[in-house]
Amino acid sequence: MPLFGPPDVQKLKTKRDINGLLHALEEKNSFSVPGEAEKALLELVGPADLPALLKALQHKNPRVRKVAARCLGKTRQAEALLPLLRAFEQDEDNKVRGAAVEALAQLGDKRAVPKLIAALYDAMNSRGFIPTDLVIALGALGDRQAVDVLCAALEFSVQRPVRGGIPDPSPGRAMEALEQIGGLDKPRAIKALTLVANQADNPSNRSRAASLLDKIKPQPEKPAPQASKAAGGGEKKPAQKLKAGSREELLQLVDDITSAKFDVRLKAAEALGKHPLKKTAVNFLLVYVREHPRWEVRISAAHALGEIGDPSAAPSLAALYTEAVGTHAYEVTSNLPLIVGALGKLGWKMGPGGWRPG
């Protein structure tokens, strides 16, 4: 039997003995002491404890290193960044590396983002899985340079086989991270969410992606006036009548292209073709054609571009036609005449090799 009992964690906590608590993490004669010491350390540590924690991060015991990493995140000190990155990249223990990722997220230093992005790409490309701790950390750090890798994670989650029928948490985490960093409106994010909504194995992931897509509404470079309708075609807010031929009226018409009502979209497309500022709507409408998640909006935008008559839009409309035919979906293919009519107005004709300038 040992001559002395296990460390008294409560006494160490009261004395704020950080080194004593770190030592208690190694206690082998009590099942509860290491856990109590870890909890106490996470409650107590602050910036003044940085030297002791940095030393503990080099300890031979992986549990000490793990707890030291977690505590370093709570200090929120810039000096902890490089040691935590080294632990994340070089420590031989998986739990220590995971704790380092958690700490980097808590530290809040965006200089860690490139390393985390590279690690997430490597995990997908080399090891065939998506570490959710990396996804969560990127969301917490809130840097929009992570949008592409999070979208890649969503795409990868759909394309890889399901393992053992176990639900994959990574798509949900990736969608949450995209929402945190404000990246849902990016073109690639819209495409990735559309892929998940249509093809994900997990119904909850499909539902979540569809819900996020419903929130997305591509915006012109300048915000539409207050009289704008919601993308779903809701009621107009009470507002003054827009001046005919004004930029405000143009933006309202562009906004109406996203309406859920066919007649509203149709009238907006025809009105855009007659508007004196119609050329300024072309880029807005091309964004809808190429990237909007709803097919009816993409086709109505194509119709509007045909009414406007800008030849530069024709290649995008031809690509839209090819994509629409490939869907084999009646609600899409039944509206092909609108795309065909628009291409015709732009002087393009269908030939053996596809659509070409006439």
Image (spheres, rainbow, N blue to C red):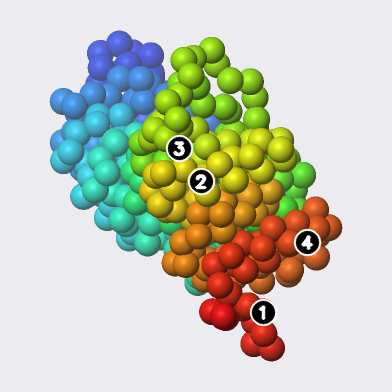
First of labels 1, 3 by sequence position:
3
Q: Where is residue 292 shown, x and y percent of the image?
A: 57, 50
The quadrant holding residue 76 is top left
Q: Nearer the viewer, mark 4 or mark 2?
A: 2
First of labels 4, 1 by sequence position:
4
Mark 4 crowd level (few <14, some 14–19, many ≥20, 10 Å Cα): some
Q: For the view shown, which residue lies furthest in the bottom direction?
A: 352
Residue contact at pointers 4 and 2, CB within 8 angstroms: no
Dot 2 lies on which element?
helix
Question: Disc 3 versus disc 4: distance between alpha carbons?
Answer: 29 Å
Residue receiving disc 3: 250
Residue receiving disc 1: 350
Reply above or below: 131 against 53.
below
In the figure, is residue 304 to the left or right of 49?
right
Residue 266 visible in the snapshot: yes
Residue receiving disc 2: 274
Q: Where is residue 183 shown, x and y percent of the image?
A: 44, 44
Front residue of 236 and 203 = 236
Reply above or below: 333 against 167.
below
